[in-house]
Image: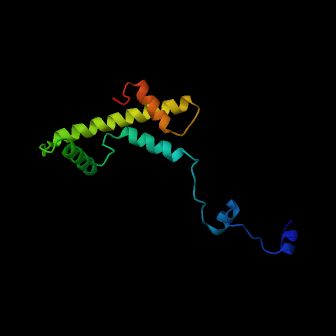
């Protein structure tokens, strides 16, 4: 066998094969299956208790809406803004959960607008008008 190899010349490797990485001393970068990183991120976010929506943009949005509806209200307590943000996040997380269940029931993985509409109709939080 050694005689045949010497006739063919030195052994060359393709860069992407495992043999090449062993020969050059470099390891191939480990890749996770599709979706594994997303599931890990979901588990991490479910364990944490911090708010997901950035505080300052949320506060600006609340102040902008308040200014449009009632120009005389100009001040907010910090606890009131925090309570609004927690309630908004809780509502959104619950809406996404229900919408995802609707998509899974329809044998889909992708969320669509009709999933959100159905989740709001079932939950009794449809448009008030």
**Image quarter hosting the C terminus:** top left
Q: Name the residue at 64% across, 69% down.
A: 24
Query: In this orientation, which residue lies closer to the viewer: 117 or 28?
Result: 117
Q: Can you say whether 57 is above or below 97 in the image?
A: below
Query: In this orientation, which residue lies closer to the viewer: 105 or 9?
Result: 105
User: In the shown orientation, is residue 44 left or right of residue 29?
Assistant: left
Residue 63 position in % (x across, y down): 21, 47
Q: Name the residue at 77% across, 70% down.
A: 11
User: Which quadrant of the view contains residue 45?
Assistant: top left
Q: Name the residue at 32% across, 38% down.
A: 89
- Report the residue that reaches farthest toward the front: 129
**Image quarter hosting the N terminus:** bottom right
Q: Can you say whether 88 is above or below 15 in the image?
A: above
Residue 114 position in % (x across, y down): 49, 34
* Colouring scheme, one of rainbow, by chain, secondary structure, one colour: rainbow
Q: How many marks?
A: 0
Q: Name the residue at 44% across, 29% down.
A: 119
User: Which quadrant of the view contains residue 92?
Assistant: top left
Query: In this orientation, which residue lies closer to the viewer: 15 or 123?
Result: 123
Query: In this orientation, which residue lies closer to the viewer: 81 or 114?
Result: 114
Residue 60 position in % (x across, y down): 24, 50
């Amino acid at each position: 066998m050694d005689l045949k190899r010497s006739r063919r010349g030195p052994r060359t490797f393709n860069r992407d094969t495992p043999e090449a990485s062993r020969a050059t001393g470099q390891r191939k970068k480990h890749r996770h299956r599709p979706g594994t990183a997303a599931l890990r991120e979901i588990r991490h976010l479910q364990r944490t208790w911090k708010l997901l929506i950035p505080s300052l943009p949320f506060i600006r949005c609340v102040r902008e809406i308040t200014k449009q509806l009632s120009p005389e209200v100009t001040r907010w307590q910090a606890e009131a803004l925090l309570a609004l943000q927690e309630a908004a996040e809780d509502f959104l997380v619950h809406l996404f959960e229900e919408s995802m269940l609707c998509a899974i029931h329809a044998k889909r993985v992708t969320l669509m607008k009709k999933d959100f509409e159905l989740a709001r109709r079932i939950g009794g939080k449809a448009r008030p008008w």
